[in-house]
Amino acid sequence: MNVKDLIKSYGRKKVVNEVSFEVPKGKVLSLIGPNGAGKSTVMGMISRLIAKDSGAIHFEDKDLTKWKSRELAKKLAILTQHNNIQMKLMVRELVAFGRFPYSGSRLTPEDNAMVDKAIEYMELEEYQDRYIDELSGGQRQRAYIAMVIAQDTEYVLLDEPTNNLDIYHASNLMRIARRLCDELGKTVILVLHEINYAAFYSDYICAFKDGYIAKFGKVDEVINKDCLKDIYNVDFEIIRVKDKPLSVYY
Amino acid sequence: MNKVNAHRRNALVLAILAAAVILAVMLYLNINSYPEKPQLHAYIMSLRMPTLVCMVIASVAIGAATLVFQSIVNNRIVTPALLGMNSIYSFLHTAAVFVFGTGSALYLNANLAFGVDLVLMGVVATFVYWHLFKKTGHNILYIMLIGTVLSSLFGSIQSSMIRIMDPDEYDALLNSLVADFNNVNGEIIAFSIIALIVIWAVLYRDLRQLDVIAMGRDRAINLGVDYDNCIRRLLFGVVCCIAVATATIGPVSFLGLIVANLSRQILRTYKHSHLIVGAGLMGMIALIGGQLVSQHIFHFTVPVSTFVTIAGGLYFLYLLLFKKGAY
């Protein structure tokens, strides 16, 4: 996936300004930056949820807007932060929706096998006949990820997946994102607020500031004192834990 | 409760509802129908049959329209009627008569007139609501507010037109505009049925996407729905259904709200194929049952729409006050 000169304005304010980068295939890429830096908007545009003003997004050598919605849904899945579905839906039924791009609402035996696999992968077997509104926040998040896994896409986009999760569930979720990449070979793109999750679990980081890309590179190239100070206007100390840069701020 | 049981339960519920509809139809056709006096019997049937068919058509149209609409806007207490679709229809119908006059061919042929209404309504209302959704970003509070304003705006324009109309034309207009259960618009039955069948056949593929659309815009797009076009087409279907229902039996404001929510409450499923059938059947029970009560207990002193409005109003309050999670 290749992003070139992306621009998006709301009213007179340019929230995304000439953003260009290339998504490394088969890696975990995190988009970080202060509030309003444009990272979620970029995520929205590369997942076709938000229309871009100008620029180009190429996905597998084809313009994103030229893709048929259904075909794209087999290649690219996005999980947004708004996860309140009002429908009376069981976990298994939710996960089965991941097969919608392939078979509509009539599932084939292969679809059911994929659903089983996704549920097993997310360790949701015992909850699969429970209604999603009866689950805890962490379980529900896992159910949504299982749906994304059932969708069986090469690209998985997660928009602030750790929002509203406690430390236990958030770190669990980050490990899952890592496993999606390492075990299932997916390209994972995350929007994150917590710098340390980004530093620990991703291969590449793209840091935004005021709509521009402040820095794009491998974790060590971005997570260092000068770079972070530049992006967040806060003093950072960097400690190395398990050979990863951990940032401390106060 | 596991999935197989839930399915069986829903099938049973739908079967019971269907049985209740058949019972209501039998009662409606046979109570006091004087089968021993053939001429009287034939006369009574000639009155009851069109009413019955119109009620069935309207139930199906209102049930489907409300469910589809609620899934589009992602809210369970909003109905097309609340947003003024009925008043747009009345306005357009009045406007057509106002412009062309009751003497024109357009007016003399009921089917032609209704066809024009349907096209006008399809174009104008789809345009209006589509832009309403787009501009407000599907913000339900704005949609409600603007819908209410639109409803009285179109209502006022219509009443201004009526005021400056020729009294004879007004009289004729009223006859075709204010359909009610004891004065159904029998002439357009065949046309309505065909229109409904054609519309839903054309929209069949979009209807199959409803289960996903009900999960919200982002999720629907993620699962490969061509969202904007799909919504526009479905909205067109909703608008036409409301036009058909309003033309055949007149405005019944709360019926859609009742049947759509009861259907969701009783069937406890997300599948629109089941929900729409359930809502249609419940609409028939409410209307035909209501007509029975109105006819044989109240002897036409209290019209069905009054029952529906009272029950619907109370149910609406109940949803607002006690079912906070429902919307």
Image: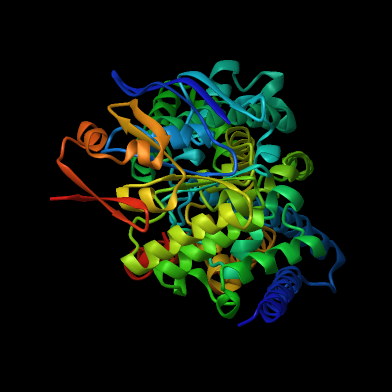
The residue sitting at 72% across, 74% down in the picture is: B11
Name which quarter of the figure residue B63 lies in. Answer: bottom right
Q: Is residue A141 visible?
A: yes
Does residue A91 sit above or below B305 in this rendering?
below
Residue situated in front as seen by the camera: B191 or B70: B70
The residue sitting at 39% across, 42% down in the picture is: A219
Residue B55 appears at what percent x and percent y? 66, 56
Residue B321 appears at what percent x and percent y? 32, 67
Does residue B227 sit above or below B302 in this rendering?
above
Residue situated in front as seen by the camera: B167 or A14: A14
Residue B306 appears at what percent x and percent y? 46, 60
Relative to A246, B210 lies left or right: right
Query: Which quadrant, please, contains the C terminus of chain B?
Result: bottom left
Residue A113 appears at what percent x and percent y? 75, 66
Rendering colour mode:
rainbow
Name which quarter of the figure residue B147 lies in. Answer: top left
Residue situated in front as seen by the camera: A149 or B316: A149
Q: Is residue B314 visible?
A: no
Relative to A29, A34 lies left or right: left
Query: Which quadrant, please, contains the N terminus of chain B?
Result: bottom right
